[in-house]
Every structure is written in C-alpha cells, then in structure tokens.
Amino acid sequence: MDLDFVRQLVQKNDSKIVMLVVDGLGGLAMEPSTRTELEAANTPNLDNLAAHSLCGLHEPVAAGITPGSGPSHLALFGYDPLKYQVGRGVLSALGIDFDLHPSDVAARGNFCTVDEKGLVTDRRAGRISTEKNQELCALLREIELEGAELLIETVKEYRLLVVLRGDDLSPEVNDTDPQATGERPLEPRAFAPPAERTAKLVAQFLEQARQILADHHPANMIILRGFSRLPDWPSMQEVFCLKAAAIAAYPMYRGVAKLVGMDVLETDSELDAELDVLEQNWGAYDFFFVHSKATDSAGEDGDFQRKKGLIEAVDARVPRILHLKPDVLIVTGDHSTPALLRSHSWHPVPVLLWSKHCREDGVDRFGERACMHGGLGPRLAATDLMPLALANALRLEKYGA
C-alpha cells in the first residue's frame, strides 16, 4: 500500500475503529488431522462475529517469510515493513520512554544462560523477574567504554536495552543472538567499514558483561539483536487522519505504536485492565490498537493447552468491545506462533473485519481452515487491512471522476 496515495483519499468523520491483536494467534495442529489452538478453543463470541464479518488469512510480510513482532505490527498499521524498517533496539527504547537521541545506536538485549563451554542453553535465562533484571543492570552500568557512553536500562523480565552514545557510531552491526540453543553467541561484526568501531565497542561491552555475570546463573550472559537508530516516519495522524491510541503493556509493542505516532496509554498486561482503559478513553480517539500478549508466550513455550485457554479468555471479553459500538472491529494476530514449533512461523494469520458496511462471506467459525475460505482470501497482504478499515468506516473518498 502506498501511504501517499491513501493520504489523498482520507476524510475525517466521527467513526471509531478498534484493532484487537491477539499476539501469535495463528497455530498448527499438534498431530495430523487434528485442530490448531484457535480451532480447538471454544470461541462462541468470535464465531458469531465471524458469521457477520469478512474473514480471511493475512500475510504480515510475504509468502514463506517468518516475521518478527516489529515488522508484523507495522504491516497491521499499514506501513510496508520492507520499506519501513527499524530494529528492536529502537522499539525497546521507545517502549520504555527512553530519551533516545538521533545519533544513538540502540540494541535489544536478552539475559541468557550459557554453559561451561559458552553455549547458549536458554535464550531467556529462565524468564527471570524484572526485579532481578534491575539488579543485574545496575551491575552492568559499572562498565566503561573508551570513546562512547554506555546506557543500560531494564525493559521487562529477561529483556534489557543497551544504548551507545557518541560520535562516529553506526547501527550496521550483526545480532549476537544465535536464535537457537546449543550455539555460541555470535561475535559482533560490522556490515560496512563505518561500523567497525561500533562493533569493537559492542565486543568490549559483551566481554566485560560476561565477566560480571559469570556467577549470576541463570542470567550469566547477554545476547543482543536489532541494532538501530531512530527513524523519521509519517504518523498515522498525517497519513490516515486518525487520532490513534495504543493499549499495550509490553514495551516493544508500545514502542512500535509510538513510532507511528500513536498515543500510548498506561495499562496493566491483563486484558480486563486494557479494556478498562479502552472504555475510559473511548471518546478521545478515532483508532484503538488493543494488544493481548500472553497467547504468543504460550506458543513460544510449546504449551498448546495454555494458548487454547488464553484464546478462550480473549473470546469471553469480546462483548465488552462490542458494547462500545465500534464502527469497525478487526480481530487478528500479528503473526502465527504455533506451540508445535515453539516460535514465530510463516503461516498466514486468521483475521476478521466487522462493520455494518461489510459483506458477510458465509464463514461461521473463526479458525484457520474456516478463514481460508473467507472473502478476504487465504493470502491478504496485512498492509491492506488499514485501507479496508478506513473504507468500512467511510473514511476514504472516491478515487477519480
């Protein structure tokens, strides 16, 4: 989707759009000829909504591409993730309201566990508490680098933010996260000569961090990913003429919402608390992004039954959203996280779009196989959801004479 083209057609009105993102919603059957987590869940409210909606499967990036959370959310918000690229470092910084300078280089870090051979045995260090994270970050702030300021902040649980501040820095450095257990953390290397100094500073930091954390099992090492700088992008207000709000508890999702100009509202991570915030702010915004994280975590843990139960918990709260009488309601995920794979996957994601102006397509169940036969098709580009939402909200003018 071309943002400049859509911007020419946008018109204001008083309609309300809600996008409920159930993180990692898509799944796979654990055994052949059985059901996915979503299909196995008891979802009477979503099924009833699907029967009066336009349904399908969307692809966050492209066929066969497994997306990260940042690109997949940008696509849902209408921003082509192949054009609008940003690393996890910036998203983490924005998500915790860190004062990121334009020349800073930021990276998202994981506390991890390594064995006596230096091999990663747990990329999330047993999901240590945020309090333990804060203790370890205080120790890491003792590290000094020659020629650059080092800034360390807790994000949440095992996640941390690492920022380099100074002259002649570059984000063109590879991730040190091997994305697998049984492997050594990767050495930081520059993608281009201007980044060689930055890569050496990162290597110095990691070596000192290794020494400091050696006796702090399970969080005895750090892996880094998403080296990046703050970009300058058009906001949703500028492109879509929407006053947009994000209701999300996890820093990464708050960061990506802030990057596209949403107001990020304070909330706890429980969906009931998020819906309280939605109700309290209903009159103040045109567009609401409501994010539910726990389903993704259950998928990454390989817990089919827990993910199924969490989907059922989301379903039970759909009536609270409908009670507000939105003009458009989209329910989907940012990507698939099958418990079978314990990770994000390339599989298209179920989506339903409800409005009083949509054509019902005969789908009467919200699940992967049912949505494959819906009117939105089996491979809708995720970036097409925003213009469809605007059209169903009567916010797009006619194109041409």
Image (spheres, rainbow, N blue to C red):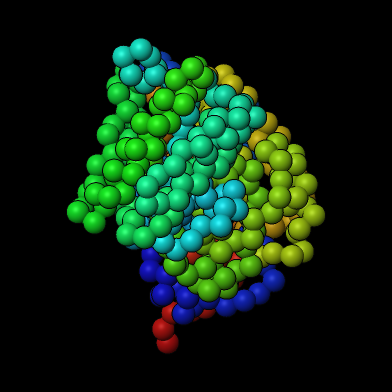
| 345 or 162, nearer to the observer | 162
Residue toward you, 180 or 324: 180
Residue at the image point whose x is 61% and y is 33% from the top:
134
From the top left corner, tell me how far across and down residue 305 is, in percent. Answer: 57, 19
The C terminus sits in image quarter:
bottom left
**How many numbered marks are there?**
0
- Residue at the spot 43% in from the left edge and 31% down from the top edge: 209
Along the line of sight, the residue nearer the viewer: 11 or 217:
217
Q: Could one spot residue 33 in this view of the protein?
A: no
Q: Is residue 204 above or below residue 230?
A: above
Compared to 399, does 365 lie above or below?
above
Residue lying at the far left of the rendered structure = 193
What x and y, as percent, mark residue 297? Answer: 53, 29
Q: Residue 205's x, y, as percent?
A: 39, 38
Left or right, residue 10 beside residue 288: left
Q: Is residue 369 above or below residue 329?
A: above
Estimate the x, y position of residue 264 in percent, counting from the top left. Answer: 64, 55
Residue lying at 38% horizontally and 64% vertically, measured from the top left: 1
Q: Residue at x 45, y 67 (%)?
A: 233
**Outermost residue, bottom direction?**
401
**Left or right: 224 with respect to 386?**
left
- Lateral position of residue 139 relative to residue 208, left or right: right
Residue 215 in sight:
yes
Quadrant in the picture for residue 268: top right
